[in-house]
Amino acid sequence: MKNRKLIDIYYKESVKDLNKTIMKDKDSWYDHVMQLPEHLQVVYTIANFHQQLFKGGFHLYFSKPHGQFAYLALENLWMIRAIKSFIILKGALNEVNMELHSPDEFRTHVFQGTLKPIKESDEDFVDILDELDTEYYSLDEDIEELLANYLKTTVLTHQHEQQLADYL
């Protein structure tokens, strides 16, 4: 099975019960994602992070409600061993969260669009995020492959073990 198809299968599963009503409420949306099985959280947060970056870079990611999952995406990048992407996202978080908000406070500011560095975006700040965008776009790290490998080694291996146990 191709990596993209495998990821799409699990992404669709991660969003099957997600609707506009849930997404309008920061806590409902976050709770919904946190209640997903771990592999679906990983797929959801990393796929959205990656898609948002290619739509408009870090500035877009942190100016849209999807950015509320940045700290979770950071953990999940580490989990799938996307170390270079992890480092770049960590750098971006250091820039946009210079006020050192807790992850919960940060989520609130991102969701409400009140994150000060994003709202005020001076030229130097925009240049820093643009540099991080460029660095991310030119990575020699294949997130799709790393995410698919994670799914293959965790979810599919577990499913095969369960099938074997059922057989025995």
Image (cartoon, grey):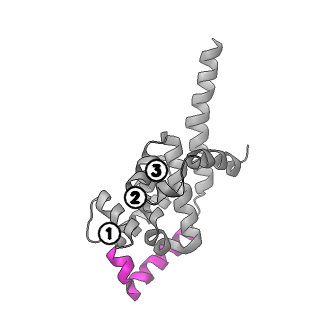
User: In the rendered view, would you say 86 is above or below 110?
Assistant: above
Let me know if residue 138 appears in the view: no
| Image location (x, y in percent) of residue 96 | 36, 72
Disc sitting over residue 97 in the figure: 1
Q: Which residue is mark 2?
A: 26
Residue 63: image x %, image y %? Answer: 44, 72
Q: Which mark is residue 83?
A: none
Instruction: Bin the neighbour count of mark 3 within 10 Å (Cα to Cα): few under 14, some 14-19, many 20 and up.
Output: many
- Part of the protein shown in magenta: 115-137
Q: Amino acid at mark 1?
A: Asn
The residue depicted at 34 percent of the width and 78 percent of the height is 117
Q: Residue furthest bottom?
A: 123
Q: Earlier in the sequence, mark 2 or mark 3?
A: 2
Residue type at the position of mark 3: Asn
Image quarter of the C terminus: top right
Is disc 2 placed on a helix, strand or loop? helix
Q: Nearer the viewer, residue 48 or 146?
A: 48
| Residue at which label 3 appears | 76
| Mark 2 neighbour class, 10 Å CA radius: few under 14, some 14 to 19, many 20 or more | some
Q: Amino acid at mark 2?
A: Lys
Mark pair 2, 3: CA separation: 20 Å
Q: Is residue 61 above or below residue 154?
A: below
Task: Please identify the dominant SS of the magenta region.
Answer: helix
